[in-house]
Image (cartoon, rainbow, N blue to C red):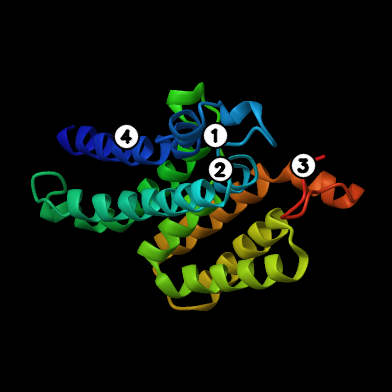
Amino acid sequence: MMFLIASLAGLTVAYLLGATPTGYLAGKWLKGVDIRELGSGSTGATNALRTLGKGSGAAVLLLDVLKGVAAILFARWFYAWPSVTPPDLQAWTPWLVCLAGLMALLGHSRSVWLGFTGGKSVATGLGVLLALSWPVGVGGLAVFGVVVAATRIVSLGSMLAAVTAIALVCGLEHPLPYRLMVIAGGLYVLVLHRANVRRLLAGTEPRLGRSRV
Protein backbone atom coordinates (compact mmCIF):
# COMPACT_ATOMS: atom_id res chain seq x y z
CA MET A 1 0.00 0.00 0.00
CA MET A 2 2.81 2.44 0.85
CA PHE A 3 4.47 1.71 -2.51
CA LEU A 4 1.22 2.52 -4.31
CA ILE A 5 0.72 5.76 -2.38
CA ALA A 6 4.31 6.85 -2.96
CA SER A 7 4.07 5.98 -6.67
CA LEU A 8 0.92 8.05 -7.07
CA ALA A 9 2.52 10.93 -5.20
CA GLY A 10 5.48 10.93 -7.57
CA LEU A 11 3.23 10.85 -10.62
CA THR A 12 1.22 13.74 -9.21
CA VAL A 13 4.36 15.84 -8.85
CA ALA A 14 5.31 15.03 -12.47
CA TYR A 15 1.83 16.08 -13.59
CA LEU A 16 2.03 19.35 -11.66
CA LEU A 17 5.43 20.11 -13.18
CA GLY A 18 3.95 19.65 -16.63
CA ALA A 19 0.83 21.60 -15.68
CA THR A 20 2.78 24.76 -14.79
CA PRO A 21 1.18 27.17 -17.32
CA THR A 22 4.28 28.95 -18.58
CA GLY A 23 2.66 30.44 -21.69
CA TYR A 24 -0.33 31.69 -19.75
CA LEU A 25 1.87 33.19 -17.03
CA ALA A 26 4.13 34.85 -19.61
CA GLY A 27 1.09 36.48 -21.21
CA LYS A 28 -0.26 37.70 -17.86
CA TRP A 29 3.03 38.86 -16.37
CA LEU A 30 4.71 40.32 -19.44
CA LYS A 31 1.83 41.61 -21.56
CA GLY A 32 -1.18 41.64 -19.26
CA VAL A 33 -3.15 39.40 -21.65
CA ASP A 34 -4.72 35.94 -21.55
CA ILE A 35 -2.92 34.02 -24.27
CA ARG A 36 -5.89 31.66 -24.50
CA GLU A 37 -7.86 34.53 -26.06
CA LEU A 38 -5.24 35.22 -28.72
CA GLY A 39 -4.09 33.39 -31.82
CA SER A 40 -4.80 29.67 -31.70
CA GLY A 41 -5.81 29.82 -28.03
CA SER A 42 -3.04 27.40 -27.10
CA THR A 43 -0.72 28.18 -24.20
CA GLY A 44 2.23 26.56 -25.96
CA ALA A 45 5.42 28.15 -27.25
CA THR A 46 4.23 28.56 -30.86
CA ASN A 47 1.23 30.66 -29.88
CA ALA A 48 3.38 32.55 -27.39
CA LEU A 49 5.82 33.34 -30.20
CA ARG A 50 3.04 34.57 -32.47
CA THR A 51 1.15 36.60 -29.88
CA LEU A 52 3.73 37.69 -27.29
CA GLY A 53 6.84 38.15 -29.43
CA LYS A 54 10.11 36.34 -30.06
CA GLY A 55 11.65 36.91 -26.62
CA SER A 56 8.61 35.72 -24.71
CA GLY A 57 8.10 32.83 -27.11
CA ALA A 58 11.70 31.69 -26.67
CA ALA A 59 11.39 31.88 -22.89
CA VAL A 60 8.17 29.84 -22.93
CA LEU A 61 9.81 27.27 -25.22
CA LEU A 62 12.81 26.88 -22.93
CA LEU A 63 10.71 26.61 -19.78
CA ASP A 64 8.35 24.08 -21.38
CA VAL A 65 11.32 21.91 -22.38
CA LEU A 66 12.72 22.19 -18.86
CA LYS A 67 9.37 21.03 -17.42
CA GLY A 68 9.77 17.74 -19.26
CA VAL A 69 13.40 17.38 -18.20
CA ALA A 70 12.49 18.15 -14.60
CA ALA A 71 9.70 15.56 -14.53
CA ILE A 72 12.07 12.76 -15.60
CA LEU A 73 14.93 13.86 -13.34
CA PHE A 74 12.56 14.12 -10.39
CA ALA A 75 11.08 10.68 -11.07
CA ARG A 76 14.50 9.05 -11.32
CA TRP A 77 15.56 10.63 -8.05
CA PHE A 78 12.29 9.98 -6.21
CA TYR A 79 11.81 6.37 -7.26
CA ALA A 80 15.43 5.53 -6.45
CA TRP A 81 14.69 5.92 -2.72
CA PRO A 82 14.48 2.48 -1.09
CA SER A 83 11.70 3.83 1.13
CA VAL A 84 9.68 4.65 -2.00
CA THR A 85 10.58 1.67 -4.16
CA PRO A 86 11.74 -1.28 -2.02
CA PRO A 87 14.53 -3.48 -3.44
CA ASP A 88 12.09 -6.24 -4.36
CA LEU A 89 10.07 -3.76 -6.45
CA GLN A 90 12.96 -2.01 -8.23
CA ALA A 91 11.88 -3.58 -11.54
CA TRP A 92 8.99 -1.11 -11.50
CA THR A 93 11.27 1.93 -11.50
CA PRO A 94 11.67 2.32 -15.31
CA TRP A 95 7.91 1.98 -15.72
CA LEU A 96 7.24 4.64 -13.10
CA VAL A 97 9.79 7.02 -14.63
CA CYS A 98 8.14 6.62 -18.03
CA LEU A 99 4.69 7.12 -16.55
CA ALA A 100 5.99 10.32 -14.98
CA GLY A 101 6.98 11.50 -18.46
CA LEU A 102 3.47 10.82 -19.74
CA MET A 103 1.99 12.65 -16.77
CA ALA A 104 4.10 15.70 -17.62
CA LEU A 105 2.71 15.64 -21.18
CA LEU A 106 -0.81 15.32 -19.83
CA GLY A 107 -0.21 18.17 -17.40
CA HIS A 108 0.98 20.51 -20.13
CA SER A 109 -2.01 19.86 -22.37
CA ARG A 110 -4.60 19.50 -19.60
CA SER A 111 -3.42 21.85 -16.85
CA VAL A 112 -5.43 21.79 -13.65
CA TRP A 113 -4.62 25.49 -13.25
CA LEU A 114 -6.28 26.37 -16.58
CA GLY A 115 -9.47 24.35 -16.40
CA PHE A 116 -7.73 21.37 -18.01
CA THR A 117 -6.69 23.27 -21.14
CA GLY A 118 -3.15 24.00 -22.29
CA GLY A 119 -0.76 23.42 -25.17
CA LYS A 120 0.07 20.51 -27.44
CA SER A 121 2.91 19.07 -25.31
CA VAL A 122 5.56 19.29 -28.04
CA ALA A 123 8.21 21.26 -26.13
CA THR A 124 7.53 19.40 -22.88
CA GLY A 125 7.68 16.15 -24.83
CA LEU A 126 11.07 17.18 -26.20
CA GLY A 127 12.30 17.73 -22.65
CA VAL A 128 11.04 14.29 -21.64
CA LEU A 129 12.82 12.72 -24.63
CA LEU A 130 16.09 14.52 -23.99
CA ALA A 131 16.12 13.37 -20.37
CA LEU A 132 14.97 9.86 -21.17
CA SER A 133 17.00 9.14 -24.32
CA TRP A 134 18.92 12.06 -25.77
CA PRO A 135 19.56 10.43 -29.20
CA VAL A 136 15.81 10.11 -29.72
CA GLY A 137 15.24 13.67 -28.52
CA VAL A 138 17.99 15.09 -30.75
CA GLY A 139 16.71 13.09 -33.73
CA GLY A 140 13.20 14.41 -33.29
CA LEU A 141 14.50 17.96 -32.81
CA ALA A 142 16.60 17.72 -35.99
CA VAL A 143 13.59 16.64 -38.06
CA PHE A 144 11.52 19.42 -36.51
CA GLY A 145 14.16 22.00 -37.39
CA VAL A 146 14.53 20.84 -40.99
CA VAL A 147 10.78 20.69 -41.63
CA VAL A 148 10.08 24.09 -40.07
CA ALA A 149 12.99 25.67 -41.94
CA ALA A 150 11.67 24.26 -45.21
CA THR A 151 7.94 24.86 -44.74
CA ARG A 152 7.58 27.41 -41.91
CA ILE A 153 4.79 25.21 -40.55
CA VAL A 154 5.41 24.38 -36.89
CA SER A 155 2.59 21.87 -36.58
CA LEU A 156 3.94 19.80 -39.48
CA GLY A 157 7.41 19.81 -37.95
CA SER A 158 5.97 18.82 -34.58
CA MET A 159 4.02 15.87 -35.96
CA LEU A 160 6.91 14.58 -38.07
CA ALA A 161 9.20 14.94 -35.04
CA ALA A 162 6.78 12.77 -33.03
CA VAL A 163 6.76 10.14 -35.77
CA THR A 164 10.58 10.28 -35.93
CA ALA A 165 10.85 9.78 -32.17
CA ILE A 166 8.63 6.69 -32.38
CA ALA A 167 10.73 5.27 -35.23
CA LEU A 168 14.01 5.95 -33.44
CA VAL A 169 12.96 4.48 -30.09
CA CYS A 170 11.81 1.33 -31.88
CA GLY A 171 14.89 1.14 -34.09
CA LEU A 172 17.49 1.71 -31.37
CA GLU A 173 18.14 -0.39 -28.29
CA HIS A 174 15.81 0.78 -25.55
CA PRO A 175 14.02 -0.91 -22.65
CA LEU A 176 10.38 -1.80 -23.26
CA PRO A 177 9.04 0.92 -20.88
CA TYR A 178 10.94 3.59 -22.84
CA ARG A 179 9.58 2.34 -26.16
CA LEU A 180 6.01 2.21 -24.92
CA MET A 181 6.28 5.64 -23.34
CA VAL A 182 7.60 7.28 -26.53
CA ILE A 183 4.99 5.52 -28.68
CA ALA A 184 2.18 6.58 -26.34
CA GLY A 185 3.53 10.12 -26.00
CA GLY A 186 4.08 10.49 -29.74
CA LEU A 187 0.58 9.29 -30.54
CA TYR A 188 -0.80 11.66 -27.91
CA VAL A 189 0.96 14.60 -29.55
CA LEU A 190 -0.44 13.55 -32.93
CA VAL A 191 -3.97 13.38 -31.51
CA LEU A 192 -3.58 16.88 -30.04
CA HIS A 193 -2.74 18.10 -33.56
CA ARG A 194 -5.88 16.73 -35.24
CA ALA A 195 -7.23 20.26 -35.88
CA ASN A 196 -3.90 21.18 -37.46
CA VAL A 197 -4.18 18.16 -39.76
CA ARG A 198 -7.55 19.38 -40.96
CA ARG A 199 -6.12 22.83 -41.67
CA LEU A 200 -3.10 21.34 -43.44
CA LEU A 201 -5.40 19.35 -45.71
CA ALA A 202 -7.48 22.48 -46.35
CA GLY A 203 -4.37 24.58 -47.01
CA THR A 204 -5.19 27.04 -44.23
CA GLU A 205 -2.55 26.13 -41.64
CA PRO A 206 -0.63 29.31 -40.70
CA ARG A 207 3.09 29.59 -41.26
CA LEU A 208 5.64 31.28 -39.06
CA GLY A 209 5.72 34.98 -39.73
CA ARG A 210 2.06 35.09 -40.70
CA SER A 211 -1.02 35.70 -38.60
CA ARG A 212 -3.25 32.80 -37.82
CA VAL A 213 -6.30 32.74 -40.07
Distance (Cα) linking label 4 and label 1 = 17 Å
- Mark 2 is surrounded, within 10 Å at the Cα level, by few (under 14), some (14 to 19) or many (20 or more) other residues, namely many
Residue ID for mark 4:
12
Residue appearing at x 66%, y 73% in the figure: 146
Q: Describe residue 31's horizontal placement relative to residue 74 as left or right.
A: right
Identified by mark 3, the residue type is Arg
Say if 158 sits above or below 84 in the image: below
Residue ID for mark 2:
44
Q: Which residue lies most toward the right here?
A: 202
**Chain-order first, disc 1 or disc 3:** 1
Distance (Cα) linking label 1 and label 3 = 18 Å
* Of marks 1 and 3, the one in the foreground: 3
Identified by mark 1, the residue type is Gly
- Mark 4 is surrounded, within 10 Å at the Cα level, by few (under 14), some (14 to 19) or many (20 or more) other residues, namely some
Rendered image: mark on residue 118 = 1
* Of marks 3 and 4, the one in the foreground: 3
**Chain-order first, disc 4 or disc 2:** 4
Q: Secondary structure at mark 1?
A: loop
Residue ID for mark 3:
212
Distance (Cα) linking label 1 and label 2 = 7 Å
Viewer-proximal residue among 201 and 11: 201
